[in-house]
Image: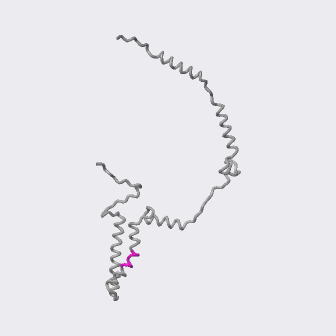
Amino acid sequence: MALEMKVYREVRAYEAHVMFGLSWRQLGALAVGIPLAGGIFGGLAYALHQGGATWEEATNVAMWVIFPILIPVAAWGWWRPKGLKPEKFFGYLIRHYLTGKVITYDDIYRPANTRTAEAQPVPEPGAPAQQARSARRAARRQARKRRTVVPREHLRATRENRAEARRAAQPARRASRH
């Protein structure tokens, strides 16, 4: 029997389930939401019933009133927009809409030499500079000239010399008696 262990994709995304399969955040939302909803529901239903409404009408109205009040509490406990906690997500959302959208582009001119402040146009991305191409060709020509060609006779001679050196290093074999 193999042991299996749940491995989370992101360690920071792990939330400990403390009680009843709920995290601390969800337990906090319940601890705030239940007394808040119960108090508002009971108080509003009682006030409406005292105003002349039946209990059925009073509880229906009170239910519709507590839903918009409990939505933020439930969202704080259970909702994870884009995997973030709601307070972090709303911070990013507000910053996104309140900051200016500035797009910067690189300058098409750059200094040719750091010692002089003259600016030269950057070559187009599709057409390589002619000077760079000719410099590469010259470097290839120089590399070809530097290469030394070893004649095959020289290789054959070194192989034979190595074989002779190996034979000389081995002790002479004795004839075996059978």
Q: Is residue 120 above or below residue 143?
A: below
User: Which residue is outermost to the left?
Assistant: 1
Q: List x then y, in percent, for residue 11.
A: 40, 55
Q: List x then y, in percent, for residue 87.
A: 44, 66
Magenta part, dominant SS:
helix
Q: Verify whether residue 97 appears in magenta.
A: no
Q: List x then y, in percent, for residue 47.
A: 34, 85
Q: Is residue 24 above or below residue 120?
A: below
Question: Residue 73 is drawn in which quadrant?
Answer: bottom left
On the picture, is 56 further left or further right than 116?
A: left
Rendered residue at 34%/89% (across/down):
52
Q: Is residue 150 above or below residue 111?
A: above
User: Which residue is outermost to the bottom?
Assistant: 52
Q: Nearer the viewer, residue 173 or 119?
A: 173
Q: List x then y, in percent, for residue 86.
A: 43, 66
Rendered residue at 33%/74% (across/down):
35
Instruction: Identify the magenta region.
Output: 63-69
Rendered residue at 48%/16% (across/down):
167
Rendered residue at 46%/16% (across/down):
169
On the picture, is 1 further left or further right than 94?
A: left
Q: Is residue 112 above or below residue 141?
A: below
Question: Residue 139 is drawn in which quadrant?
Answer: top right
Q: Verify whether residue 64 appears in magenta.
A: yes
